[in-house]
Image (tube, rainbow, N blue to C red):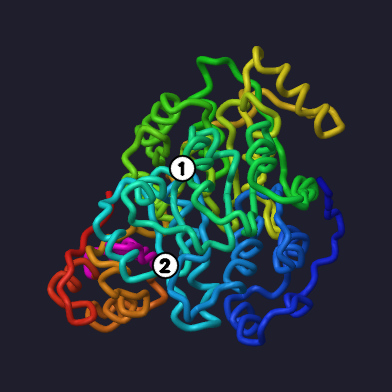
C-alpha cells in the first residue's frame, strides 16, 4: 500500500484545508489553531475521500483527523446514519462522541448517538428511533443493535476504526468483521491504530481500498522527557515507590503496573501510607472505572495506578510524571507509557523501577534509543518524611446529565448563585448522559452539596453528593 511518513516539523494552519468558513470559524473557537502532525498528514487525504491506515496514539489529535472528514460529508437534511465510529471502550466512545459534538457545532442539527455496553439498551433504542447522523460505540453493543433490527448501516459513507489494535486485543475481531459486513461497499474506511499487528493488516486488506498508510514520527517527544531509572530489590519495590513519591512530591502522576493484581496491591499500599491514589483495571465495573478516570482528570486524586489496557484512551493534559512500577514486556509499550508526559513542548518526568532480573530489558531499551541508559540505586534517594501532597479538588456527583438537558453553564450558575461559591473555586465540569461531575476546592465542597440539595438546577431537583 502507498505510504506517507511525516517527519516535517512544520505545522500548517487549518485554513489550508478546503473547509466551509463556518467549519473553520468553529475550529478557531474551539482552540484548533494549528494542525498536529497526524492531522496535517491525514486531513488532506481524508477530505479527499482516501481510505487511511494511520499510526496514531491517544493525545495526537486523531479524533479531529477523522472527525473533520466524517462531519464534512454529512447530508444533514437526511436523518439517516452516515458515519460509524467503533471504539474499544465506553470511556473512549464517550470521549470521541463529545469531541465530535464540539467539532459539529459549525452546522445545526447534527445528531450523534453513543451506543456502548454497560448501560441499558432502551434509551439507546429511543435515540435511534428519533434518527441520527453518526453512531459512536463499542463493537459488542453495536452488533447487539444490528441483530435486534434497531440499527441500519445501509447508508453509511464513512467508517472509523479507532484504536483498532486495542479492539483486537479485547477480542472484538469477529464483531468488527460482522459489523463491517452491514455497511455499503462504497464507503470510506479510516483505520487508526497505535501498532500494526497482523490482524490489523488483515482487517485493512479485507475492508479497505488502496489505503494510504500514515506514520507520524513521535521520537521528538522523548527530548522533553527526563527518563530516570532506579534499581532495587523485589522486596523493596513498594517502599522504593513511596520514597520516590515523597521525594518528588508529584501533584499528578500515572503509575503503570503489568497486572491487575499488582495495580490493586500498589494503590492499597499507597493509600495506607497516606497518599491519594486510585486503582484502574479491567476487573472494575464500568461505572466505577468512569468515576475513577474523572476524579484523576479533576485532580481529586493525585495518583492513578493502572494497567496498560485500562489506561488506553486516557488523555490528560500536562501530566507531569509517569512512573513504571515495573518495566513492561514490550519496548513499544514503554514508549507509549512515557509518551503521556512531556507533551506539547512541556517537560515531563518518566521514572522506572526495575530489579536485577529485569536489567536485560533496560539494555534492550537502550538499544532502541541508540544509547546506554544510566541508572541509580533506589537507596540513594533520601527518605523524606514530610506531609503528603493533598488533591487540589474533590469531585461532586449530580444525578442529572446530558439526557436531562443539563449543561455545564447550568451547573456553574447554580453553584455561583444558589451556593454562593465563586467560579475561581470550581474546576472541571463533566456532563455525561445521566450524571454530572464537578471539581470543587475542598473548603467549599460541603457548602455546594448542601445548597444544591436544597435548591434546583434548571428548575429541577437533583441529588448531589461527594464521590469517595
Q: Residue at x 34, y 37 (%)?
A: 284
CB contact under 8 Å: marks 1 and 2: no
Dot 1 falls on a residue whose secondary structure is: strand
Q: Residue at x 64, y 59 (%)?
A: 188
Picture quadrant of residue 196: top right
- The residue under label 2 is 427
Indicate whether residue 113 is drawn in magenta: no
127 with respect to 349 (left or right) = left
Q: Residue at x 31, y 81 (%)?
A: 413
Q: Is residue 396 visible?
A: yes
Crowding around mark 1 (Cα neighbors within 10 Å: few <14, some 14 to 19, many 20+) is: many
Residue 25 image position (x, y, % from top left): 63, 85
Q: Is residue 89 above or below residue 380?
A: below
Dot 2 falls on a residue whose secondary structure is: strand
Q: Is residue 39 above or below residue 29?
A: above
Q: Is residue 384 visible?
A: no
Picture quadrant of residue 227: top right
Nearest the camera: 156 or 140? 156
Residue range of the region highlighted in magenta in the rendering: 428-447
Mark sitting earlier along the chain (1/2): 1
Crowding around mark 2 (Cα neighbors within 10 Å: few <14, some 14 to 19, many 20+) is: some
- The residue under label 1 is 304
Indicate whether residue 436 is drawn in magenta: yes
Q: Is residue 261 above or below residue 133?
A: above
Q: CA distance from mark 1 to mark 2?
A: 19 Å
Nearest the camera: 131 or 41? 131
Residue 274 image position (x, y, % from top left): 37, 38
Residue 132 image position (x, y, % from top left): 41, 69
Q: Quadrant of the N terminus?
A: top right
133 with respect to 271 (left or right) = right
Residue 256 image position (x, y, % from top left): 54, 34
Amino acid at each position: 500500500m502507498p505510504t506517507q511518513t511525516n517527519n516535517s516539523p512544520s505545522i500548517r494552519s487549518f485554513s489550508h484545508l478546503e473547509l466551509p468558513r463556518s467549519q473553520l470559524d468553529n475550529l478557531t473557537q474551539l482552540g484548533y489553531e494549528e494542525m498536529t502532525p497526524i492531522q496535517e498528514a491525514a486531513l488532506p487525504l481524508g477530505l479527499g475521500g482516501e481510505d487511511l491506515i494511520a499510526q496514531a496514539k491517544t493525545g495526537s489529535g486523531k479524533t479531529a483527523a477523522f472527525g473533520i472528514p466524517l462531519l464534512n460529508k454529512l447530508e444533514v437534511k437526511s436523518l439517516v446514519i452516515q458515519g460509524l465510529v467503533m471504539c474499544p471502550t465506553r470511556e473512549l466512545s464517550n470521549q470521541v462522541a463529545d469531541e465530535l459534538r464540539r467539532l459539529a457545532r459549525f452546522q445545526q442539527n447534527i445528531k450523534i448517538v453513543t451506543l456502548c455496553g454497560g448501560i441499558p439498551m432502551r434509551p439507546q433504542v429511543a435515540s435511534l428511533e428519533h434518527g441520527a447522523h453518526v453512531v459512536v460505540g463499542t463493537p459488542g453493543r453495536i452488533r447487539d443493535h444490528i441483530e435486534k433490527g434497531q440499527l441500519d448501516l445501509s447508508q453509511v459513507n464513512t467508517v472509523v476504526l479507532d484504536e483498532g489494535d486495542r479492539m483486537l486485543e479485547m477480542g472484538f475481531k469477529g464483531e468488527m468483521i460482522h459489523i463491517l459486513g452491514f455497511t455499503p461497499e462504497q464507503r470510506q474506511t479510516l483505520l487508526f491504530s497505535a501498532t500494526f499487528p497482523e490482524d490489523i493488516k488483515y482487517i485493512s486488506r479485507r475492508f479497505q481500498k488502496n489505503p494510504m498508510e500514515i506514520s507520524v514520527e513521535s521520537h521528538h517527544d522523548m527530548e522533553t522527557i527526563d527518563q530516570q531509572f532506579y534499581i532495587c530489590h523485589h522486596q523493596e519495590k513498594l517502599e522504593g515507590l513511596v520514597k520516590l513519591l515523597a521525594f518528588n512530591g508529584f501533584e499528578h502522576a500515572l503509575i503503570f503496573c503489568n497486572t491487575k493484581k499488582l495495580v490493586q496491591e500498589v494503590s492499597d499500599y499507597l493509600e495506607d501510607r497516606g497518599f491519594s491514589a486510585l486503582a484502574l483495571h479491567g476487573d472494575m465495573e464500568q461505572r466505577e472505572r468512569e468515576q475513577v478516570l474523572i476524579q484523576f482528570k479533576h485532580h481529586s486524586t493525585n495518583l492513578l495506578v493502572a494497567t496498560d489496557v485500562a489506561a488506553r484512551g486516557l488523555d490528560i493534559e500536562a501530566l507531569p510524571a509517569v512512573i513504571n512500577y515495573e518495566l513492561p514486556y514490550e519496548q513499544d509499550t514503554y514508549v507509549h507509557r512515557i509518551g503521556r508526559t512531556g507533551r506539547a513542548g512541556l517537560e515531563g518526568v518518566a521514572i522506572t523501577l526495575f530489579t536485577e532480573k529485569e536489567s536485560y530489558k533496560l539494555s534492550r531499551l537502550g538499544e532502541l534509543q541508540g544509547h546506554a541508559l544510566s541508572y541509580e540505586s533506589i537507596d540513594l534517594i533520601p527518605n523524606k518524611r514530610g506531609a503528603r501532597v493533598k488533591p487540589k479538588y474533590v469531585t461532586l456527583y449530580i444525578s442529572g446529565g446530558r439526557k436531562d438537558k443539563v449543561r455545564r453553564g447550568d451547573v456553574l450558575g447554580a453553584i455561583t448563585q444558589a451556593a454562593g461559591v465563586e467560579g475561581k473555586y470550581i474546576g472541571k465540569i463533566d456532563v455525561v448522559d445521566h450524571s454530572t461531575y464537578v471539581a470543587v476546592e475542598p473548603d467549599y465542597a460541603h457548602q455546594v452539596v448542601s445548597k444544591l440539595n436544597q435548591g434546583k438546577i434548571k428548575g429541577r431537583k437533583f441529588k448531589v453528593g461527594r464521590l469517595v
